[in-house]
Image (spheres, helix red, strand yellow):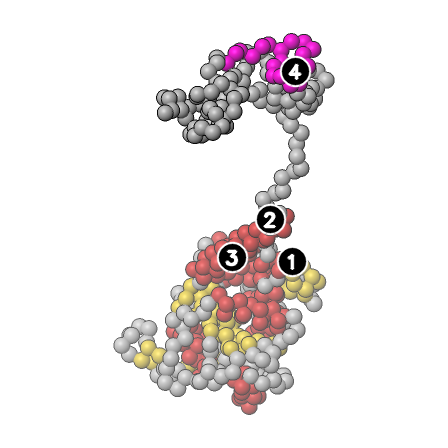
Amino acid sequence: MNSWQDGRYGGGAQQGQSGGPYGGGDGDAEPTRSMPHVQRPRRSGAPYGQQRPVPPQPSAGSPQGGYGTAAEPPLPPGLNPRGPGGGRPAGSYGSAVPQQYSGPGGPGGPDGSGYGGPPPAGPPRPSRWPTRRKVKVTLVSLICVLLVVGVGTYFWADSKLRREDVLQDYAGRPAAGKGTNWLIVGSDSREGMSKQDAKDLHTGLGAPGKRTDSMMVLHIGSNGNTMLSIPRDSWVKVPAHPDSDKPSSTIPARMHKINAAFAIGGGPLLVKTVESATGLHIDHYAEIGFAGFRDLVDSLGGVDMCLAKPMKDPKSGANFQAGCQHFNGTDSLKYVRSRYVDGTGDLGRMKRQRQFLSAIADSAASPATIANPFTLYPTISSGLGTLIVDKDCGLYDLTSMFWAMKGVSGGSGKTITVPISDPGRTTSEGSSVIWNDTKAKQVFDALRNDTAVPDVS
């Protein structure tokens, strides 16, 4: 019978005797039951069950580098976390010394100091805004600013326009033809003028109401633009209209000077009279007074004019020498109002007025004016502030009018006067201008149908 030691480690036999794998007795005896050998893990640096000794301090010249049973080859100074000697420095057992930069000024550097400064700089970091993107952003920003300024300028200028219900429908009104017809009126209105202005301009304070000082039809069409002057003393039929003194009564149609229609019924009656006399449908209307004309020229910085001969008119105040000269607003008004300088009366004045208005349009529509805000905004403010237009007129329409007048002054259009048979017939209203009905009809038909205007001079 087995003893209580059977099956135990080395039980029942001396080490080295025959038997079981662990010396368990005679060879013919029942083999003892073996237990697997279990070995507990040893702690690093000390055998199981023993106290871990304190590692010895490294000594100079020790091949082991401080402790351990095998010599460890030292690492380069800059990569060895244990220090130059290969072991850990005294008092720092169990902790690692952070690696230090050993560049110039570091532990391995020339000066041997403890800090070697920042590591060398790497390649430059690429910009988050490449040049191409900066250019695109700049261009987009500039376009946005221009759009905002342009839109703001448009609405500001549009608010300056003085719109009136001038183009009114009535029975028998001519149908709209081809192209666009403007009725442009220069009135003798003293609105905005002081007593000193009236004295300087030789206009006087004038009678109540206003009269036309110039009148013309500007036709914009596919066969070129035409500027047609209408003498203000033209003897035409003024349509029936309400009596200004008795609004409930009507004054019947009668022959009168065309200027009287403007004095009696303003723009609406003048448009109706021009349409009835010419058979042309008026699409837009523009009117400017003395003060507005003067201020417009001054805002443009004046206008250059060339005179073939000296010009002197005591009634308008004009007194100019022959040759090219620069006119300011006051000089310009004296020039366009003169009618007693060459014996041609109204006909010579209308010719000068067309010439001067074309020069104004050319200057107002020039790049030097449009691109210069110090000229553009004063021009818009002074020109539009005293300009009366029809209620359907917009800035686009007004711009097309100026460009058409600029084209006429540049030679791409035609300037004519209504054909006349008698420039000074005595009538019930004094000396009047009588049209040549046959030739005048040819001109009116050409404008209505937008065909080439015949030469009827």
**Residue located farthest toward the bottom when viewing the structure as drawn:** 438
Question: Which tag, 2 or 4, sits closer to the chain's start?
Answer: 4
**SS at badge 4:** loop
With respect to residue 171, does 31 lie above or below?
above
Q: Along the line of sight, which residue is nearer the eye, 77 or 446?
A: 77
Of badges 3 and 2, nearer the viewer stands: 2
Dominant secondary structure (helix, strand or loop) of the stretch shown in magenta: loop
To which residue does mark 1 refer?
326
**SS at badge 3:** helix
Q: Residue at x 50, y 80 (%)?
A: 234
To which residue does mark 3 refer?
147
Of badges 2 and 1, nearer the viewer stands: 2
Question: Which tag, 1 or 4, sits closer to the chain's start?
Answer: 4
Magenta part of the chain:
52-71
Give me the disc on residue 139. Answer: none
Residue 72 visible? The answer is yes
Count of numbered circles in the view: 4
To which residue does mark 4 refer?
64
